[in-house]
Each structure stands twice: as C-alpha cells, then as structure tokens.
C-alpha cells in the first residue's frame, strides 16, 4: 500500500497524512475484526486465542447436529428459491419496461424502488395478513377458488417475502442494460433474416446475461444474509443468520456463531464464484449507443406488458401498503379489511418513534459520513494509483460487501469486547459496524465516479500551479459531490432500517427505530409496530426523494 | 541558452517483468526563446512522454530538463510555472469559462481586480469574451480548446506545452485552430513546444521540428530541411510522400547511377543511413534514391519508365500511381491539375527528375 501512497501523494504532506489515516482505519475496523472473527471460529467456546486451543469442533456440528444441517439446507432452499422467483418475475418485468411502450414508465420505475427503501422485515409480517390463515388473499382464495395456500410460516413464506423484497435490484439492473442496449445490434440480426423470437433468444438474452446473473447474485446474497424476514416468518424453521443469533443470544456461544458465519460467507462466495463462471466470456457491447432501445408498441404487447408489470408491482408493494393500512386500524379481526380506523396507534408510539428515530438518524448519519470520507479517499487511491497492491485495497473494502449483517455483528462482538478496544454496548460499535457494512457501496460509487473524470483534469490543475489539496478542494470534490451525495443518501436511508447487525450490537440507551419495530412485531403488537414502521418508511422515503432532487438523479437511477 | 528550454540526454524507462522498457532514450534538443518547436512522430514514439517529463507530470529516468536556464529536473510540476494544453482539453467542467481561465491566477493569489483584467485580456485575445459566463459543456470542441489555451497562457508562463491539441477536432477546424495558435504565439512572442503526429500540421506552423522515431530524435530541423533533406529513410518516409528507387552503385562507375530505363548523375546530396536502417538497402553495393512525387515529371525520355495504373483527383493535384519497369515498387507522381501534360490511366511513359531534387541513401558516404 505504501507504493500507492507515494504514487498518489507524491511529496505532498497533506496527501500522505490522509492516506496514512485511511490505512490505519482499514486495518483497525475492517481487517482486524474479520481476522479475529475467523480465528474465533476455530476455538472452543470462551477459549483464549492460542495454538493449543485450535479445533474444528464448531464446524463439525454441521455434520452432527440436525439443527445445523437443517439451517444450512433451509438457507440454500429459501435463498435459492427467492432468487429463482425474483428472476421469474423480474426478468420479464425488465423486458416489459425496457422494450415495450408501457404507460407511466417513470412512475413504474419510481415505485419499483420502494421495496428497497422499506426494510424487508417491516413488510415480512404483512405477508401473514396476506397469505396467513386469515390473510386477505387466503380468504379470497378459499372463498372463490376453494384452495388453501400452504402455511405462511416456514420456507414458503420466507421465500416469497425475500423474493419480492429484493426483486427490484435484479429488475433495475436488467432493465438498465436492456434499455441502454445498442438497437443496431438487433437491427443487424433482423437484416440477416432472424425472427423476433430468434433475436431475443440468440442476441438479446445472451447480451443481457451478465446483468441477469449479477442481479440474481445480488438477490441471492441479500437473501442469504437476511435476518429479519426468516426470524419473523420462519416459525420453527431456522436459517444460518437466525442460527447465529440464537447461538449468541441464547447460548452466549460467540465461537459457534463465528463458525456458522464462516459457512454463511462460504455460501455467498460460492454464489460469487458462479457469477464469475457466467461472466467468463465477458462481453461489453451493451453500452455506448446514443439511441435508446427500440420499444415495441403493438397493442397486444402493450396490454400484456402493462398487466404483468402492475401485477408484480402490486405484489411487491402490497406488504408496505398493508402495513400503512394496519397502522390506522383499531380492530382487524376475522374480516377482509379492518373494521374501524383511528390514529390511536400513532398516539401510542409517537414519543418512542421520535426518540428511536433520533437515535437512528445520529447513528446512521455518523456512519454515512465515515463511509463517504473513507470510501472516497480509498476509491481515489485505487482508481488513480497504479501500484500492484491495488487488489489489497479492493479486497479489504469489498469483502464486507459480501458479508451478511450478522457476520459483521459477530466479528464486532468478538473484536471489541475487551479493553483497550471495549466498544460493546456503546453507540460507537453500531456506527462502526454500519460503516463496515456500507463502505464498500460508497467505495464502488466513488470509484465509478472518479474513473469517469479525466485524470488530465487533475494534471491541468497541477500544471496551473495547484497543490494536491487545492486540486482536491477546488476540482475533485465539486465534481464528485453529486455522485457521493446520491450514495450517501442511499447508505443513510438503508441504515435506518438495518437490523441484522444491529440486533447483536445495539444497547438500550441507543435503541434505533428498526429494533423498536422488531421488538413490537415479536411482542405481537402488530398495529403499533405498523405505525412505527410507517413512520420509518415515510421518513426514509422523503429523505431519498429530497436527496435525489439534490443529486439531480431519478430514484431508480440511484439504486443502480 | 538563457531564457530557453533544453533537454539533455532525457530518458524514460518503465520496469517490466521482462526487463526494462525504454520509451524515450537520450533525447537532446534546445528550444530558443520565442520559437515554435514541434515534436513530430507516429503514435508510441515517445514524444508525449518527453513532453510530460518536461512538464513534470512524468518522472525522469535519466538526463535533465532546463527551463529558463535553471535545472528543473527535480522541481515538482506545479512549481515549474509552465502552461500546458491537453488533447482532451481537460477543462474544469464545474467552473465557468471565466473561472477556468482565472484558475491559475487564483492559485497565485492575485487580487480580484488584477484577475479580472488579466482574464479579460486573455479572453479577448482568443475571442472568448462573449462566452465568459458559460460552462465548458455548453461550448463546441474548438471553443473548448481555445479556453484551454487561454487557461494556460493567462499567468504568462515562459513556455507553453501543447499535447496534440487539435487531434479531437474535425479537419476544417483543425486548420483554422492551428493558424490561431500560431497567431497567438507570434502576438505574445512566447516559446511553444508542440506535440503532434500530423506531419502536415507540423510543417505548417513550426519554426523547427524534431522528428521522433522509437524513442529517439531522428532529425531536428526547419520544415524545409526535414522535407527536402531527410537524414534517414524513416524521416523521408514519415514526412510527406516519398518514392524510393533501388540503384546499383557499381554498374556505371562513380559518376553515373544505373536505373532500369536509363542512367542519371549521382546526386550531390548523399546521406549515410543510421545503422538500424542498413537492412533496407539489401546488401551489396546498393543505394536508395529518394524522389518526392511532385519532383517526378512525365517526359519523352528519362531514367524511369512505367505504366500508369490509376489516377486520383486530389483537388489541386492529380496523383498517378505508376508501376515502374524493373523496380518492384509503385511510384507516386503528383502533377498540378493545371499542368499542360497530364497522365492517363493505362498509358506508358518515361519519367524524369532533376538530380538536385533527389537524395541518395547509402551505408557510408
């Protein structure tokens, strides 16, 4: 890394100091907790770190204990199922939006983002109201079709909730690629005499394949790491993240938790490996056209596309709509819809909402600032530096990106529970864990933005006589500001609803709103949980809207 | 020379796994005050690397750079007080044209009144005054290039470096802009170091040209000199068009040269080729005679005989491609379209040239 430092910083003391601080932070808060967590997995519960204590016992349970085996199986089943379901709904929807002249395109794109803004666990229990024993759709199906859907608690419900929560990632990626495709490629195929179906099968689909694969991977990784949805909808069923949680919170066995975390990460890495396999024959032809994709406007295609898009949208938004509806309900018994409405729920939770939302804003805000500062600086070093150790920075920062929240939680519990780094129970540990979870995202956005700025612009500034600091202040920061702002808002908004790292690390004095909602769901105070959830959703949505205005981007663009 | 710019034995090597890669080696030249000096060569010949070493943007592996009589080799780029114009313009997209131009003055901490005055003068000089409040994105390529020149000139650097400044412009604008650059250079009397791969551009605006070949300077001279008196095959071939005829030196004694269709005198200008070009002569006591296309004229009698394969109309010129007898080469013959004698496709005729217009390349003089 020192080679990088000298390369970018030259002899400028300001640049050297900034780079040195970045390296220390990376070692202390990214490398150390993860390496420490890795070591913990090979130790018996509570043992000191020493050669003589090393054991594989924590991993052996995946072969001996039924609960471990089942959790591993369930994780693969629900995440894989959610990925396939999301693909089945998201890919046709992407085709419909990108290639058919549908109505209200920008509204569709804006609405499609909402499931990403609303934390999945808030919507999870809404599925009980939809497909549970007395759920709306269950009631309708029993009455009109005479079919009873499978019980919502368990693999089936978790799979549906995960798929519809993370589907927008896949949809937006594939839609973006299809919409940006150079129509000349398909026109060329058409001129050779290929039929529309043949073009779709042999040209369009293969060219969109990298985006489809990447989108499916995101859904898979997100589902694999999700704690909120399976903990609420899983019922008796355990998956790896919930297993980690119960090992740590039920049996206080951090070492077992670390071992499960490693298995969880291995699954994620296997997904990444699959993606690399798919993308081995890298093609990058779907960019660089000034013309947009040609959109079909036949009435049959339009009718089918519109209908499909809205069915998926309604399905994906239904949970959040029900949460909002429930928050105003006073009684919701055996009826299809609530029987009386009022603001009582809001009155009950208002004080708590203000306090916990305030906590969330402070914790997420500080983490976001840290992410932006650190992410931007390291991205600059990586993009502009030409040193060999670039991959080391890349790896250090990108690794937490594939780590589920609970894994980060475990790593932090293990790393910072003794002096001199005693952070457990403080607000700082949450801020740092949030930072660890989101810095990769900011890093990636910043790296893309920096790569788009001609390095000659910096050289021009230097030639004019500017120091490194002056160039950063007057040229680079103003140029990067819109991109960084968009990334910052996204990080901030998604941290407000973060639960999987939070649930292991929070303390009563700094309880964030996500935990407040989660506690009420577990306590079966669903109406009040809905009120809190709706406040959280609306506040987050408003912040993203305001932010996208400031950054001058559409909401759907910010998530790509 | 005081006030000038000189590089001495300038070298750049990059360490690679298979040993060091030398991209610039032993470059020597001096630019005089007020001179328009061009580094010309094909892409990858090291001319841009040389320019960037002079600017301080690239570290120097060996040799030295002197600016205004002072050794600048170890001075950081920002302290060299040089003006530089980039191929991609590299304007600051978030600053107005005025602020782009004022940038260097703000660093030099001038007062607001002074900045306004200096920037206005500079904008005037480049006819940019009406655009002062626009952003770079709202300007055409030619206008952006003028802004980038203004930005480099405003703090009155002793030397202006230009790195392929016209490469991104269309043909017509390119010709217009190069005249403009020359005009501004004369008006300010500033020393200019210019990089281009376009030999016509270099010929049109330079006081002197350094022709680069694979990291070395092949020849330095005024445009006339490098065109009329090339010192290597590379220069003869790279600058303009050239016809090469293999001649046997022994066949007709020392005073005459034998060509397939006749004899000619030995030209006065005989150039000993650099060692790495000896292979082109093909061993024995061979020589290569170089004649520019516009120096070949159709005649009733002459040392070259060939049939006209095809003719291209280039506007002022008509260019004939002639398959010469006894020479395995296609010759190019350029005739003004106003000339009384024109070529016809398919015709066979003789071609003559004045011996003063030819250069003879040999291994040793």
Image (cartoon, coloured by chain):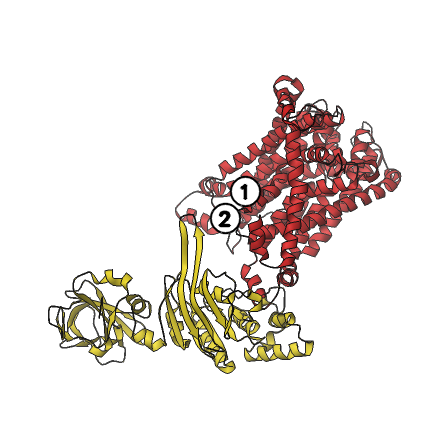
Chain colours: A red, B yellow
Above or below: residue B187 compared with residue A122? below
Give the structural element (helix, strand or loop) at label 1: helix
Q: CA distance from mark 1 to mark 2?
A: 10 Å
Image quarter of residue A113: top right
Judge whether residue A303 can be spotted in this image.
Answer: no
**Is circle 1 on the same chain as circle 2?**
yes
At label 1, counting other C-alpha atoms closer than 10 Å, the crowd grade (few under 14, some 14-19, many 20 or more) is: many
CB atoms at circles 1 and 2 under 8 Å apart?
A: yes
Q: Position of residue A75 (x, y in %)?
A: 63, 27
Foreground residue among A435 and A357: A435
Residue beneath label 2, please?
A286
| Label tally | 2
Instruction: Classify 10 Å Cα crowding around label 2: few (below 14), some (14-19), many (20 and above).
Output: some
What is the x, y in percent for residue B334? 26, 73
Which residue is disc 1 drawn over?
A: A211
- The chain letter under disc 1 is A
Looking at the image, the residue that sits furthest to the bottom is B187
Q: Chain of mark 2?
A: A
Q: Which element carries disc 2, helix, strand or loop?
A: loop
Give residue B249's position: percent from left, percent from top: 15, 68
- Would you say B46 lies left or right of A246 here? left
**Quadrant of res A323:** top right
Depth order, front residue of A13/A310 = A13
Q: Which residue is at a point 70% across and 39% down the rendered structure image? A: A317
- Mark 1 or mark 2: whose residue is earlier in sequence: 1
Q: Residue at x 65, y 18 (%)?
A: A65
Q: Position of residue A12 (x, y in %)?
A: 61, 59
């Amino acid at each position: 890394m020192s080679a990088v430092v000298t390369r970018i910083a030259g002899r400028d003391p300001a640049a050297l100091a900034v780079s040195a601080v970045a390296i220390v932070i990376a070692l202390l808060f990214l490398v150390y907790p993860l390496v420490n967590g890795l070591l913990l997995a090979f130790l018996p519960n509570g043992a000191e770190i020493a050669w003589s204590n090393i054991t594989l016992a924590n991993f052996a349970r995946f072969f001996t204990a039924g609960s471990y085996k089942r959790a591993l199986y369930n994780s693969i089943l629900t995440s894989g199922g959610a990925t396939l379901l999301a693909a089945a709904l998201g890919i046709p929807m992407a085709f419909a939006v990108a290639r058919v002249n549908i109505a209200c395109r920008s509204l569709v794109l804006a609405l499609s983002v909402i499931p990403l803004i609303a934390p999945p666990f808030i919507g999870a229990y809404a599925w009980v109201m939809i497909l549970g024993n007395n759920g709306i759709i269950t009631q309708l199906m029993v009455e009109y079709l005479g079919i009873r859907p499978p019980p919502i608690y368990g693999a089936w419900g978790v799979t549906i909730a995960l798929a519809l929560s993370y589907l927008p990632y896949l949809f937006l990626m594939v839609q973006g690629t299809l919409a940006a495709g150079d129509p000349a490629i398909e026109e060329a195929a058409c001129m050779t005499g290929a039929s529309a179906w043949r073009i779709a099968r042999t040209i369009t689909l293969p060219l969109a394949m990298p985006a489809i694969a990447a989108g499916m991977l995101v859904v898979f990784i997100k589902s694999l790491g999700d704690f909120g949805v399976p903990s609420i909808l899983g019922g008796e069923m355990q998956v790896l993240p919930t297993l980690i949680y119960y090992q740590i919170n039920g049996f206080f066995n951090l070492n077992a938790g670390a071992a499960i975390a490693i298995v969880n990460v291995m699954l994620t890495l296997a997904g990444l490996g699959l993606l690399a396999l798919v993308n081995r024959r890298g093609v990058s032809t779907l960019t660089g056209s000034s013309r947009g994709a040609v959109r079909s406007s036949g009435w049959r295609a339009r009718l089918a596309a519109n209908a499909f898009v809205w069915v998926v949208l309604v399905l994906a938004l239904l949970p959040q709509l029900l949460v909002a509806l429930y928050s105003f309900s006073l009684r919701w018994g055996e009826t299809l819809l609530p029987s009386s409405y009022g603001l009582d729920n809001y009155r009950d939770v208002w004080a708590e909402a203000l306090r916990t939302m305030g906590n969330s804003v402070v914790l997420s805000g500080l983490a976001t600032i840290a992410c932006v500062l650190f992410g931007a600086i390291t991205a600059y070093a990586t993009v502009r530096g030409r040193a060999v150790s670039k991959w080391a920075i890349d790896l250090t920062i990108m690794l937490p990106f594939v780590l589920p929240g609970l894994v980060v939680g475990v790593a932090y519990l293990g790393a910072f529970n003794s002096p001199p780094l005693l952070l457990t129970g403080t607000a700082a540990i949450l801020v740092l864990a949030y930072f660890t979870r989101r810095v990769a995202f900011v890093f990636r956005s910043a790296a893309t933005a920096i790569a788009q700025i001609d390095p000659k612009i910096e050289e021009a500034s230097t030639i004019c006589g500017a120091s490194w600091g002056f160039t950063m202040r007057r040229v680079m920061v103003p140029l990067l500001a819109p991109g960084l702002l968009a990334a910052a808002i996204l990080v901030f908004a998604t941290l407000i609803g973060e639960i999987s790292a939070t649930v292991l690390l929070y303390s009563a004095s700094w309880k964030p709103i996500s935990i407040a909602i989660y506690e009420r769901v577990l306590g079966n105070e669903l109406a009040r949980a809905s009120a809190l959830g709706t406040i959280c959703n609306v506040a987050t949505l408003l912040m993203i809207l305001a932010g996208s205005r400031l950054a001058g981007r559409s909401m759907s663009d910010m998530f790509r | 020379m005081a006030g000038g710019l000189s590089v001495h034995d300038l070298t750049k090597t990059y360490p690679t796994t298979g040993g060091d890669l030398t991209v610039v080696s032993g470059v020597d030249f001096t630019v005089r005050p007020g001179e328009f000096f061009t580094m010309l060569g094909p892409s990858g010949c090291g001319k841009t690397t040389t320019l960037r070493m002079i600017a301080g943007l690239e570290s120097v592996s060996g040799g030295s750079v002197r600016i205004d009589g002072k050794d600048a080799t170890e001075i950081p780029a920002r302290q060299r007080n040089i003006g530089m114009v980039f191929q991609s313009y590299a304007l600051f997209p978030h600053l107005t044209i005025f602020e782009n131009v004022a940038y260097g003055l703000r660093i030099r901490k001038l007062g607001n009144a002074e900045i306004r005055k200096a920037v206005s003068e500079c904008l005037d000089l480049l006819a940019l005054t009406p655009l002062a409040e626009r952003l770079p994105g709202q300007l055409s390529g030619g206008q952006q290039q003028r802004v980038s020149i203004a930005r480099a000139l405003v703090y009155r650097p002793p030397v202006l470096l230009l790195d392929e400044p016209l490469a991104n412009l269309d043909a017509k604008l390119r010709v217009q802009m190069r005249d403009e650059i020359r005009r501004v250079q004369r008006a300010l009397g500033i020393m200019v170091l210019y990089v281009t791969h376009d030999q016509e551009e270099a010929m049109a605006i330079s006081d002197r040209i350094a022709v680069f070949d694979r990291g070395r300077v092949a020849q330095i001279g005024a445009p006339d000199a490098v065109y009329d008196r090339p010192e290597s095959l590379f220069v003869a071939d790279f600058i303009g068009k050239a016809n090469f005829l293999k001649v046997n030196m022994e066949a007709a004694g020392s005073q005459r040269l034998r060509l397939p269709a006749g004899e000619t005198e030995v030209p006065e200008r005989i150039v000993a080729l650099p060692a790495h070009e000896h292979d082109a002569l093909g061993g024995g006591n061979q020589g290569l005679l170089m004649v520019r296309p516009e120096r070949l004229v159709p005649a009733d009698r002459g040392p070259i005989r060939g049939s006209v394969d095809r003719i291209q109309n280039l506007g002022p010129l008509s260019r004939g491609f002639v398959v010469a007898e006894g020479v395995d080469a296609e010759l190019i013959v350029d005739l003004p379209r106003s000339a009384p004698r024109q070529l016809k496709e398919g015709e066979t005729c003789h071609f003559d040239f004045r011996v003063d217009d030819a250069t003879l390349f040999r291994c040793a003089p």
